[in-house]
Image: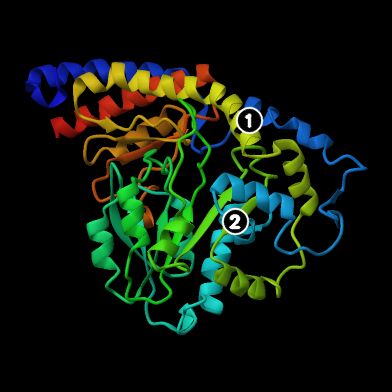
Amino acid sequence: MKLREMSRDALLQFYAETKAEYDACKAKGLKLDMSRGKPEKQQLDLSNALFSLPTPDTYMCDGIDARNYGTMDGLPACRALFAEILGVKPEQVFAAGSASLTLMYGLISKAFTHGLLHSEAPWSKLDKVKFLCPVPGYDRHFTICQSFGIEMLNVPMTETGPDMDVVEEYVKDPAVKGIWCVPKYSNPEGIIYSDATIARLASLKPAASDFVIMWDNAYCVHEFSGEFVPFKEMLTECRNAGNPDMVFEFASTSKITFPGAGVACFACSEANMAYMKKLLNAECISFDKVNQLRHVQFLKDKAGVLAHMKKHAAFMKPKFDAVIEALDSEIAPLGFASYHRPTGGYFVSLNTMEGCAKRTHQLMKEAGVIMTGAGATFPYGKDPQDANLRIAPSYPPIAELREAMHVLCVCLKLAAAEKLLG
């Protein structure tokens, strides 16, 4: 029977049984963590060959000594590797350090200090700067905005990406300077933007001349079920739509090799590249080309990357299967929650009964299971429905994950029963 259809007596019995089950969970003294989307140790071990690269006699690449100063925009071989993965030209790629988040922060920072290519003034000189944030979304994007005092505007996510009717209305405001996008296996819902959504994004006519699409392609090769899914190349889409300078694309090897020691890049139009290199020249001489070289030697090309990601999938798929199996068996029959079934990426987005996410999170914490905070997938940590929770299955061993999912399901049921009983 659906939870909402139960009589009060039946609901009271359900609550009592669930509360007893919850107390039993608490009595176990669990200490489980599924708070962040981190690879597990065995996934990291897949890339241990990086420690022996480059060998002492292979530090030269394209006539460049990777150990020395220079080549600020990255080794040509590394730029070519990212270009093949993203479907762009090598001259449109800037290969940098280990974190794409640093590059995203850096771009917004330069917008404030210097302005972007088509800015009439640095953003710091403006009375108001606003950004569009598809929700649920990635908390780190929101943190960047909040750190600069950018006003964030929620854009509902649909099954095909951001609600473009809302986006197209918002961009009529010249204070709206950009939008965050995770176009493939979006964080946390695992949605792939449709071709129609991408076309509408590329064809936007914003009032702000320096409007920027922050195209965070973090999971571009991160299938864990099925074969590689091709995606629209956004730089080309924007150029064809008459907006060649409107997008910056970001990617990294963070969940391909080592999150703490990978390589990140941004890709953009040639005009944007020339402008950004002029600004970046003031802050750096070069990034870690030795690390770029070892990644080129290890991954080799797009085919090598996809083969490597198949090895990751062997660890990831059983964990996502465990999450969905638990929700299907314990929650779906009760009819009070919904969730996505991603085939790639790192998260499962769960919507519980309205008004129950924070309570569920509290119950989980008291039972010894840590997960991403309720509200984290919304700007300012404020989920208007208090319903969304982000499940990150990748890090715990699968036995611990199954234990954590059982606790989550018990907490979901208990919070929902409390809500219905008033």
Question: Do we see residue 382 in this rendering?
Answer: no
Label 1: which residue? 308
Residue type at mark 1 is: His
* 155 in relation to 311, above or below: below
Q: Distance between the residues labelled 2 and 1?
A: 23 Å
Residue drawn at x 14%, y 30% as measured from the top left? 421
How many residues crowd around disc 2 within 10 Å: few (fewer than 14), some, or many (20 or more)? some
Q: In which quarter of the image is the N terminus?
A: top left
Residue 420 % position (x, y): 15, 31
Outermost residue toward the right?
57
- Percent x, y for residue 370? 47, 34
Colour scheme of the rendered structure = rainbow
Estimate the x, y position of residue 324 in percent, counting from the top left. 36, 23
Vertical arrangement, residue 82 with respect to residue 368, above or below? below
Label located before the other in sequence (2 or 1): 2
Q: Which residue is drawn at 51% across and 74% down?
A: 111
Quadrant in which residue 7 is drawn: top left
Residue beneath label 2, please?
89
> Could you say which is closer to the camera, residue 229 or residue 218?
229
Q: Which element carries disc 1, helix, strand or loop?
A: helix
Q: Nearer the viewer, residue 415 or 321?
A: 321
Image quarter hosting the C terminus: top left
